[in-house]
Image: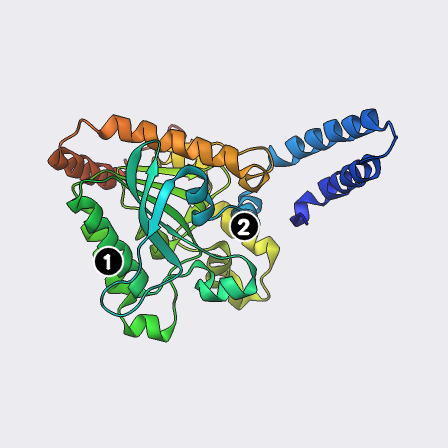
Amino acid sequence: MKYYLEFEKPLEELETKIDELKRLSDGKDLDITSEIKKLEKKAKERRSEIFSNLSPWQKTMIARHPDRPYTLDYISLIARDFIELHGDRRFADDPSLVGGFGRIKDVTFMIIGHQKGRGTKERIYRNFGQPHPEGYRKTLRLMKLAERFRRPILTFIDTPGAFPGIGAEERGQAEAIATNLMEMSRLKTPIISVVIGEGGSGGAIALGVADRLYMLEHSVYSVISPEGCAAILWKKSGEIGPEEFSKAAEALRITAYDLLKFKVIDEVIPEPLGGAHRDPAFTAERIAETVMRALEEMKTKTPSKLVDERYRRLRKIGIFEEGVSDTQ
């Protein structure tokens, strides 16, 4: 059963009717093909109209869509011979972060990513994609393993943020994230990161210190969620809701095209009309093509040059110039 977001409701009625007509005609001597084609054309036009005018808050809802492909979905679509590796060798294994070696178009990558889980049982097991410190320590162990064997690293980012519980803080959540940032900045192997859903706070950037950073068209990447931002700004003035969330999302500039404009990311990867969940195979193929193109650009660089360029790329983020506007 398809799940529709609130702003997709006009589309739901049309697509439900198309499905009913297809079931009605299945195996029966009924010629309703022309009627189905008319409705499909209308649905496509309606979908195009909706998705060409999305607000940042609506894009946030798409990034969180329950049917959206997660890390393991993309791995199954683009990687062969994937072997998942577990544990941080200090405390435990964290299921909210998965990683292991896998082959993409005959190149062996260390593939790492957040995993939110589907259904209540798995989501609880995966902690809704919110990693603990042992998750970040596990991923760092795997990245160093990739460096040792001179294998490129591919990370998939999709988390509302690192887990903020007492246990996580007691085990050094902030230190684990900070160590990942420092160590990733000097790993002597190519690192490619793709934001596939939510990129939330330090929980996301702990996998995002990369030579190339990409975002799917309807993903979001921000220091805080729109709800968290709205709570900070407007909670004292009264109740907060969708209107405040929308204003916060607009102000945060969290969409892929906003971040491309600010040169935080390198490229936006297109999604099928309606979002990645409408055609996961198409989205996965676009990701694979982008990753392999990026790797081709980096394969001639020496390890020291890779590290130097990664440092310079990170240092450029947030640069601004002061000046007097023409209106003054």
Question: Which residue is nearer to you in this view: 100 or 292?
Answer: 100
**290 is higher (above) or lower (below) than 138:** above
Percent x, y of residue 158: 43, 50
Q: How much space separates mark 1 and mark 2, taking CA atoms?
A: 30 Å
Label 1 or label 2, whichever comes before in sequence order: 1
Residue 160 seen? yes
Percent x, y of residue 243: 60, 53
The residue where tag 2 is placed is 247
Q: Which mark is residue 230?
A: none
The residue where tag 1 is placed is 178
Question: Which residue is nearer to you in this view: 82 or 142?
Answer: 82
* Furthest residue in direction top, as rendered: 34
Q: Quadrant of the C terminus?
A: top left
SS state under label 1: helix
Q: Residue at x 44, y 56 (%)?
A: 160
**42 is higher (above) or lower (below) than 197:** above
Give the foreground label among 1 and 2.
Answer: 1
Q: Which amino acid lies under the numbered mark 2 shown in the image of this protein? A: Lys
SS state under label 2: helix
Residue 184 seen? no
Question: Which residue is nearer to you in this view: 194 or 226?
Answer: 194
**322 is higher (above) or lower (below) than 125:** above
Quadrant of the image occupied by residue 78: top left
Question: Which residue is nearer to you in this view: 220 or 300?
Answer: 300
Relative to 33, is 151 on the left or the right?
A: left
Relative to 42, is 94 on the left or the right?
A: left
Percent x, y of residue 106: 31, 32
Q: Residue at x 36, y 36 (%)?
A: 262
Binning the other alpha carbons within 10 Å of mark 1 as few (below 14), some (14 to 19) or many (20 upward) gives some
